[in-house]
Image (tube, rainbow, N blue to C red):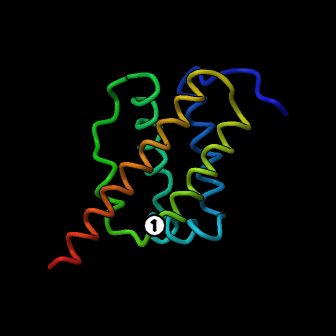
């Protein structure tokens, strides 16, 4: 099925997040990492993600957290980010088309870049000690 509409509201965000993280949970590479950390707290995690993406895509000031710190200690590298981005992009592309869908994908790439840069900095700093 070819998507015919753009991301328009919070229900659309919930659809993306739910389908995307359903795929993440089953993925052989990144699923075990997410499932190990989140365990049986997926509902709470998804609620935060709805707010995060609502803030990023619609400018609503509903998310005030800091998304990087919980990821700082995870055993993740470029391969993991590439898989995360691939799954995210595929999910958005199967559901929506338009400027906000494109913005969601662009934001995901920016987030991955920033997280990878921060993780590299932390790693390099700890190796210099």
SS category of the residue bearing label 1: loop
Give the quadrant of residue 37.
bottom left
103 horizontally vs 122: left or right = right
Residue at (56% x, 55% y) in the render? 84
Pinpoint residue 13: horizontal percent, then vertical percent: 56, 33
| Mark 1 lies on residue | 77
Check the image and report above or below for 15 versus 19. Answer: above
Give the quadrant of residue 22.
bottom right
Pinpoint residue 60: horizontal percent, then vertical percent: 37, 23
Front one among 22 and 127: 127
Check the image and report above or below for 125 versus 87. Answer: below
Pinpoint residue 124: horizontal percent, then vertical percent: 26, 70
Check the image and report above or below for 123 versus 17. Answer: below
Residue at (14% x, 79% y) in the render? 129
Front one among 84 and 124: 124
Quarter of the image with the N terminus in it: top right
Residue at (65% x, 64% y) in the render? 27
């Amino acid at each position: 099925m070819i998507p015919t509409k753009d991301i328009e509201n919070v229900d659309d965000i919930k659809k993306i997040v739910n389908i995307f993280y359903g795929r993440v949970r089953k993925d052989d590479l990144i699923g075990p990492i997410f499932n190990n950390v989140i365990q049986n707290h997926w509902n709470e995690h998804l609620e935060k993600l709805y707010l995060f993406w609502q803030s990023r895509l619609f400018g609503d000031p509903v998310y005030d957290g800091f998304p990087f710190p919980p990821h700082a200690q995870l055993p993740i590298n470029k391969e993991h980010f590439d898989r995360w981005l691939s799954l995210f992009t595929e999910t958005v592309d199967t559901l929506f088309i338009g400027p906000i869908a494109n913005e969601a994908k662009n934001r995901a790439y920016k987030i991955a870049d920033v997280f990878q840069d921060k993780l590299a900095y932390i790693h390099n700093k700890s190796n210099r000690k």
